[in-house]
Amino acid sequence: MNQLYRWAQFSDVLGKLIIGSLLLSSGCTKSTEKPAPQAEPSTIHVAVNNAGPLILTTNAAEFRILESGSVQAILLKDGSKLTLDEPGSSAGDHVVRDDKEIHFKLDFSQAKVNDAAGKLGRGKHVEIPGQSTDASDTGLQRKLLIDAYDDFPNLLLTSSVYTNTAASDYRIDKIIEQQHQFDSHVPKKSYEMWSFQGSSYEWGKDDIIKLTSGFSQPNAMGGMVKGGYGGGIPVVAFWTASVGEAIGHVETLPLSLSLPVKVQADGLVSASVDIPARTILQSGGTYSTPRSFLAVYSGDFYEPLHLWSRVLQKEGWEIPKPSNEAYNVSWCGWGYEFNVTPAQMLGTVPKLKELGIKWATLDDRWFDTYGDWRPRTDTFPGDSIKKMVDDFHKQGELVQLWWLPLGVEDGQSKYESHKYVLSKVAKEHPEWLILDKNGKHARMIRNLAALCPALPEVQAYYKQLTEKFIRDWGFDGSKLDNIYSVPKCYNPAHHHKSPEDSVNAMADVYKTIFQTTRAIKPESVTQSCPCGTPPSLAWLPYMDQAVTADPVGAVQVRRRIKMYKALLGPEAAVYGDHVELSAMMRVGHDWLEHGNDFASTIGTGGVVGTKFVWPDPGPKFKNVLLTQNKEAHWKKWIGIYNEKMLSRGVFRNLYVEGYDIPEGYAIEKDGKMYYAFFAPSSAAWKGEVELRGLEPGTYRVVDYPEGKDLGTVQATADKAPRLATAFKEHLLLEVSR
């Protein structure tokens, strides 16, 4: 893919040169037009020292490229130079062949520095050749490519071109890039830092953690991993109170590689981009690595994720603006679990209207067979599903449909109590299925077989399904659930160039679903849920509403809302999931959900949701029953949400996760600032909170859930006001002039 990308860049430049030459030679008439203004030169400074290092300096950072190929980042802030890179670390990028590491020495005397201009703007492009340091293995040469851009001063992009100069073939098993050893500079605790791990690795695992001794995580990206998970955001980030660094890749495809992170025995934190090349280069052949990045910043995980997203948007990612309906409160029928009926769904309508809830979701197991998606005859007989949708619409309610694209039943295995049969689509089109290396049906999440998204026929099938759900049945959107990645496809009938084609094409199916839905109903809502994990870059641009995805408690709700605001924009619609998930207790292999923390969703700019049952359907559902006491609480907080609609405000990243105590968030809306602070434990918190981001002036402070006036504060140009307070669990403030 990278070869194609670079060829496209070269072709574009070559085409412009040819056109320019033709224009110059087309005639001798003197032009009376004024010459086009020259583009301003890059402000990035490149210092080349033949003995190394090569140093690129932007207006925010300094990047040092060492002789070993190791790259170190330094933040330039307030006259200081800050870094997490261990100064003595110089292992550098390398190739692995037969379990042997092949390292390279860069030749700075041959470095080429040129101006760069492209999708990311103006900047500098550097090429540095390198030779193997192993005298017995000199058949492979490396060229390090470096790009820095004025509009992205905290970012450095790198890639490598490996060339086989030997007369015989040369095998490359693995390539290690962006190898770093990070140091917090805390004595005896070099790992004393926080981290974001972007992989879809395990349900319920924290994405944002404080590193501990012995921590290790492989962070496989792109393709499917054990358990059916996979995909992920190819970023790992690290930060202290003063500085942070992040690495990953900036390709728009979900490449199958890994970003392993490990706390070493000496306490240093190792991280790298590991590329499973598995290639044989013929004599004269080349291999180009994906573009990886190194970012240095001040703040927490929000900064590199937002930066990464901006880069991908320049590269062609289109993040859609959420529909207006994506910000409205949602109720989900999952409170009734697998066997919900139209009567139970419609029975909640009086409470939905009374509480100000606009959406209802028909959740899991309304259907007979994965892949065919026909209503169950025992719970939704005849045309009852369409009639139910019509009845919701008559009451002014919108309805969303749960489904899981690409998974199909093939008569093997089961999920929960549902034993799989041979679905109609698998029976009629067995040639559509993904096959594994052994020629058997590959398995995805829920141990389902999978249709190959790279096939145009499969993409057309999901367009037809979407049209049926949205146009024919009348649903107003989809809740796409349990979506991660798909298996690699080895089906010879598909004529793939690579088994990765199925993984890379997953985006095409989700794009089809999203665009088809929008075309039929412009104010529809397509929600995508990677249950319990970070999302995948493959389908991230193809939805109206992200979701905190089965959060295990309120802390995950808050952190994941912040994550999605970084990725999708500060005004993104992010569903906080069912409020019942804001407090959970482990019971055997299951979780008891008993949360009522609306503040964690409202205060961070998320969209409120719930899955209560009403009226009382019996003791089985007592944990989610909307009792009289709960109803008063639900009414208060849903009313606050609908009044303030902070989810439509602008998320301001003013507080650093892990270091600002209490945990803080800020939303700007309608000329006001809204702050949310959360106590670090169940005990009451007492002290001062800092109200950041205010212009100079005098402000009135109100505890808006309680309607309590807290007086005034004064903000100056060089100092944020502080408010003395005491609270338990949370404090939500409205600050206005």
Image (cartoon, rainbow, N blue to C red):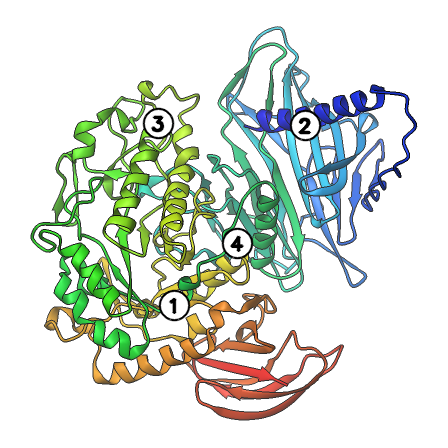
Three-letter amino acid code at the position of disc 1: Asn
N-terminal label among 4 and 1: 1
Residue carrying label 3: 489
Q: Position of residue 223 (x, y in %)?
A: 41, 36
Q: Are marks 2 and 1 in contact (CB under 8 Å)?
A: no
Kind of element beneath mark 3? loop
Q: Are marks 1 and 3 in contact (CB under 8 Å)?
A: no
633 to 105, vertically: above or below: below
Residue carrying label 2: 12
Note whether residue 101 is visible: no
Q: Quadrant of residue 162?
A: top right
Kind of element beneath mark 2? helix
Q: Position of residue 484 (x, y in %)?
A: 37, 44
Structural crowding at the residue carrying mark 2, measured as other residues with C-alpha within 10 Å and reported as few (<14), some (14–19) or many (≥20): few
Three-letter amino acid code at the position of disc 2: Asp
Number of marks drawn = 4
Residue carrying label 4: 567
